[in-house]
Image (spheres, rainbow, N blue to C red):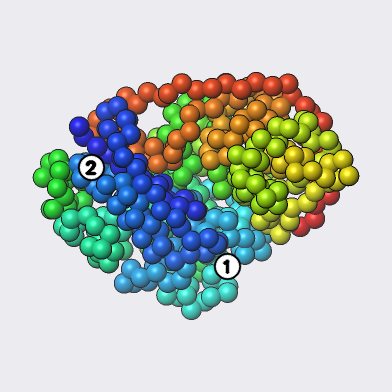
């Protein structure tokens, strides 16, 4: 059996799945936590990856590996390859003013949409680099290279494999790093920086220089069929005398599309730390409103995407307030009537990206004596979270053949049953899985074979739409001020 490994280095944790390259059968897996916060030293990602690999039984028998990671994070390296400062993550909103300034300087939203398929908001790397140049000029001057979280992990992994040391967290923790010019990325993750164009397939270094004041070294962008190869000399059980192929990797949303087997006509709603709605498209998009980010995907096609900052953690917050676990929160929500008796929760708990309200906060509307119950709160929290994603689906302006619901919050029975009443269409729910890690593993498998990974049975949920829920949500969000 030939094995492949897929890594999902997300905001909250690192997951590793090891699968059979031909069939996709799960052989073993592991995970490790990441620190909380909106900035973190990348060394924590490396430590978590090593811990997750150890829990997954190491790399014995693994012939190829791919890393998928959270998009947009700003990783700055000096000339020696050392991290200059803690990485700013996608959910860090301190660069909101920088985004506003960059839009104005280029001539408005349309100019950005035409140039790189997106309009800057605080999430994107280009705005974080402007913030760094303005607020930490010494760190900006020290920056010799800029990469993304998945780029950095792939680079570290290549160095560890090339060292020849058999896998172990202790042996690999301080493994040497390759030269800076060995940094690589893929078109999917590069398309979320704000200085790479999906339509031309090239960096826009003029935009980077305008934002940052200089052009540091950038990772080489690999196509879907490219590969990075490293050799480990002591990999017991690995085929080909220990030769391990490292795939280009990609961003987490692009990997999720691979993992769920999304095809043209599908829309995927992913409920993780953030909420994302994306579709597989044959041509690039450019939305001057900024709602839709015109990303590339990991296959050579495109992935128009709308992202909200607040998804699964809205349920976490509601569960804390109610003093229950997530399973109990689901049960409570199903005890309340559709519309939660008029209670509406606006889920802008950490500001919001779509709509672009980085300084907004959450709010509750329609609170009465009758709706002051844990059940009404639970229902309102789930409905508010889903209303934000339904607005995102509307922004894509598509008529999907299927709407696929994935992510941690999709495991909630209440979310599955309430979603059709909010979206107004049937919802297809694949079985719970680590779809980002699975997508990375699938990418790795393509370096070795033509994988035939068959999806397990999915479930379809239907329900009568309740338009009043979204009407009340629209009224409530219209009252929010930045």
Query: Tag 1's secondary structure?
Result: helix
Left or right position of 227 against 185: left
Of callouts 2 and 1, the N-terminal one: 2
Disc 2 and disc 1: Cα gap in Å? 41 Å
Q: Which mark is residue 62?
A: 2
Q: Determine the image quadrant of residue 396.
A: top right
Above/below status of 24 relative to 125: above
- Between residues 167 and 289, which one lies in front from this camera angle? 167
Q: Residue, x 56% and y 31% (percent of image)?
A: 405
Of the 4 image quadrants, the one containing the N terminus is: top left
Q: Determine the image quadrant of residue 433.
A: top left
Horizontal and vertical percent for residue 116? 53, 48
Please give the residue where the numbered disc 1 appears in the rendered image: 131
Horizontal and vertical percent for residue 59? 24, 47
Q: Residue, x 17% and y 59% (percent of image)?
A: 165
Left or right position of 7 against 413: left
- Between residues 293 and 258, which one lies in front from this camera angle? 258
Horizontal and vertical percent for residue 73? 49, 57
Q: Which mark is residue 457?
A: none
- Between residues 63 and 298, which one lies in front from this camera angle? 63
Above/below status of 198 relative to 468: below
Residue 251 visible at all: yes
For discs 2 and 1, the disc positioned in front in the rendered view: 2
Query: Tag 2's secondary structure?
Result: strand
Residue 110 visible at all: no
């Amino acid at each position: 059996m030939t094995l492949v490994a897929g890594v999902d280095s997300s905001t909250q944790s690192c997951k590793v799945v090891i699968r059979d390259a031909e069939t996709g059968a799960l052989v073993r897996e592991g995970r490790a936590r990441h620190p909380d916060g909106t900035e973190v030293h990348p060394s924590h990602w490396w430590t978590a990856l090593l811990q997750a690999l150890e829990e997954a039984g190491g790399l014995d028998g693994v012939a190829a590996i791919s890393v998928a990671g959270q998009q947009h994070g700003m990783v700055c390296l000096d000339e020696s390859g050392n991290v200059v400062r803690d990485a700013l993550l996608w959910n860090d909103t301190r660069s909101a003013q920088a985004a506003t300034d960059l839009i104005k300087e280029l001539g408005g939203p349309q100019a950005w949409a035409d140039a790189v398929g997106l309009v800057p908001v605080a999430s994107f790397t280009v705005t974080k680099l402007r913030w760094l140049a303005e607020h930490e000029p010494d760190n900006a001057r020290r920056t010799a290279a800029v990469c993304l979280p998945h780029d950095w992990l792939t680079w570290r992994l290549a160095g560890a494999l090339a060292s020849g040391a058999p896998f172990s967290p202790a042996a690999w923790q301080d493994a040497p790093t390759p030269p800076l010019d060995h940094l690589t990325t893929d078109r999917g993750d590069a398309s979320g920086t704000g200085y790479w164009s999906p339509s031309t397939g090239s960096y826009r270094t003029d935009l980077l220089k305008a934002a940052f004041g200089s052009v540091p070294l950038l990772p080489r962008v690999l196509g879907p069929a490219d590969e990075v190869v490293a050799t480990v000399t002591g990999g017991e059980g690995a085929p080909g005398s220990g030769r391990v192929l490292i795939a280009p990797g990609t961003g987490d949303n692009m990997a999720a599309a691979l993992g769920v087997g999304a095809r043209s006509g599908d829309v995927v709603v992913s409920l993780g730390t953030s909420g994302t709605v994306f579709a597989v498209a044959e041509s690039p998009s450019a939305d001057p409103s900024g709602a839709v980010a015109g990303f590339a995907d990991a296959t050579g096609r495109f992935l128009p995407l709308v992202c909200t900052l607040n998804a699964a953690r809205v349920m976490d917050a509601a569960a804390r307030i109610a003093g229950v676990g997530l399973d109990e929160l689901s049960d409570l929500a199903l005890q309340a009537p559709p519309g939660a008796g008029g209670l509406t929760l606006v889920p802008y708990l950490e500001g919001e990206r779509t709509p672009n309200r980085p300084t907004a906060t959450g709010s509750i509307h329609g609170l009465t004596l009758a709706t002051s119950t844990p059940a009404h709160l639970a229902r309102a929290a789930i409905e508010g979270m889903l209303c934000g994603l339904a607005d995102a689906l509307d922004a894509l302006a598509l008529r999907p053949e299927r709407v696929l619901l994935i992510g941690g919050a999709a495991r909630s029975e209440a979310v599955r049953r309430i979603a059709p009443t909010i979206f107004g269409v049937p919802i297809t729910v694949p079985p719970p899985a680590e779809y980002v890690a699975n997508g990375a593993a699938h990418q790795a498998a393509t370096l070795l074979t033509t994988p035939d990974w068959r999806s397990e049975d999915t479930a379809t949920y239907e329900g009568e739409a309740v338009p009043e829920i979204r009407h009340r949500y629209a009224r409530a969000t219209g009252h929010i001020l930045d």
